[in-house]
């Protein structure tokens, strides 16, 4: 059975990689780029929010740090397209370093207090970037894009984001079957009991938090280059953090497949709302959906339908 799953996954990946060769409209490439990005963000958040049960509402900060670090490096050093794409990796490492520094004191706090602290952290990072001109200030940062046809440039970044998604999902698959993942699940069940079982809870929480910030940082760097212009209001938007949490919880936190399902479905919903609804209405719908998921599907859509079938 495992062989068939791996074969199906490999076939789907190959089909997605071949999609740009069908010469679709740029809109569809951009849409799939967004799907890949949100799968990365939701799956990464799941490392700490799903497996460990520490609901972070500040992951947009790591996404934004990666975006601004990549954009600043590209504009300062006039990096070539290839080097700009590669610069997103050290930008992800910077986001992970910030997560290490912030996570050490924050992860000592549990429950809703941790969620509130992560929201405040995201706001602090946004205000810092807006008020320091060197970091981008209120004007944002422009990036020089590839000097090639638009469809080809979009196709290249499509493939790069797809590769990052595959790597992220590979790490997520490994985490779910590793001792680290087992320790995180023990923390989610009962952290005090986990400590009495000699599980190094503080250490593995930090590891998961750092890992959950690394991939969003890289994705933020690629996103910045894709847009060619970024502003703090865009990449540090609290809606991104809420959407990431909602995607993971909607699909099923603490599972490998759940964030993927949630990200795909809600990216489609988000695209529809962005096109046909005002921002205020979209926020109301997100809030209502978050309440519905929390009350009726606390373990996600996968567990909800599993119980329906067994019942």
Image (cartoon, rainbow, N blue to C red):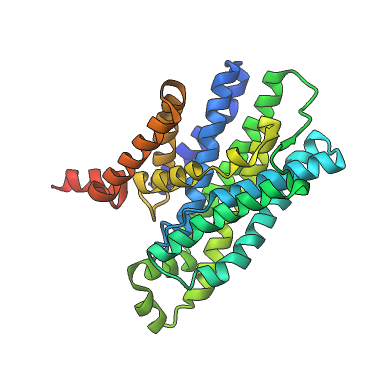
Q: Quadrant of residue 145?
A: top right
Nearest to the observer: residue 182 or residue 52: 52
Q: Is residue 198 left or right of residue 189?
A: right
Nearest to the observer: residue 120 or residue 142: 120
Give residue 96's position: percent from left, percent from top.
Answer: 63, 59
Residue with the most extreme right position: 77
Q: Is residue 105 above or below residue 76?
A: below
Q: Quadrant of residue 52?
A: bottom left
Q: Quadrant of residue 285?
A: top left
Nearest to the observer: residue 47 or residue 182: 47
Give residue 37's position: percent from left, percent from top.
Answer: 55, 39
Give residue 21's position: percent from left, percent from top.
Answer: 62, 20
Number of numbered discs present?
A: 0
- Residue at image point 64% right, 37% down: 223
Q: Is residue 210 visible?
A: yes
Give residue 208's position: percent from left, percent from top.
Answer: 52, 63
- Residue at image point 79% right, 45% down: 73
Residue with the most extreme left position: 311
Q: Is residue 1 above or below residue 230?
A: below
Q: Is residue 257 visible?
A: no
Q: Is residue 18 left or right of residue 69?
A: left
Q: Is residue 98 left or right of residue 28?
A: right
- Residue at image point 41% right, 27% down: 273
């Amino acid at each position: 059975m495992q062989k068939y799953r791996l074969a199906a996954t490999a076939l789907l990946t190959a089909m997605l990689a071949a999609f740009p060769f069908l010469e679709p409209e740029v809109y569809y490439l951009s849409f799939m780029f967004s799907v890949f990005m949100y799968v990365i963000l939701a799956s990464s958040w799941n490392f700490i929010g799903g497996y460990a049960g520490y609901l972070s509402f500040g992951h947009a900060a790591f996404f934004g740090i990666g975006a601004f670090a990549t954009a600043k490096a590209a504009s300062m050093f006039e990096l070539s397209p290839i080097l700009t794409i590669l610069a997103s990796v050290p930008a992800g490492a910077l986001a992970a370093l910030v997560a290490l520094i912030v996570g050490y004191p924050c992860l000592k706090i549990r429950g809703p207090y941790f969620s509130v602290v992560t929201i405040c952290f995201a706001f602090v990072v946004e205000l810092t970037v807006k008020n320091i001109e060197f970091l981008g200030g209120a004007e944002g940062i422009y990036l020089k894009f590839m000097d090639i046809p638009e469809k080809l440039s979009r196709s290249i970044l499509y493939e790069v984001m797809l590769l990052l998604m595959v790597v992220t999902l590979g790490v997520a698959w490994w985490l779910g079957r590793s001792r680290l993942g087992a320790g995180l699940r023990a923390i989610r069940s009962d952290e005090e009991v986990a400590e009495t079982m000699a599980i190094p809870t503080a250490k593995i929480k930090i590891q998961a938090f750092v890992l959950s910030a690394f991939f969003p940082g890289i994705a933020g760097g690629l996103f910045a280059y894709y847009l060619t212009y970024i502003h703090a209001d865009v990449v540090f938007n609290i809606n991104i953090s809420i959407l990431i949490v909602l995607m993971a919880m909607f699909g099923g936190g603490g599972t490998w497949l759940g964030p993927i399902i949630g990200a795909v479905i809600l990216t489609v919903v988000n695209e529809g709302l962005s096109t046909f609804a005002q921002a205020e209405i979209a926020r109301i719908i997100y809030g209502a959906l978050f309440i519905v998921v929390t009350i009726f599907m606390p373990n996600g859509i996968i567990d909800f339908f599993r119980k329906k079938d067994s019942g």
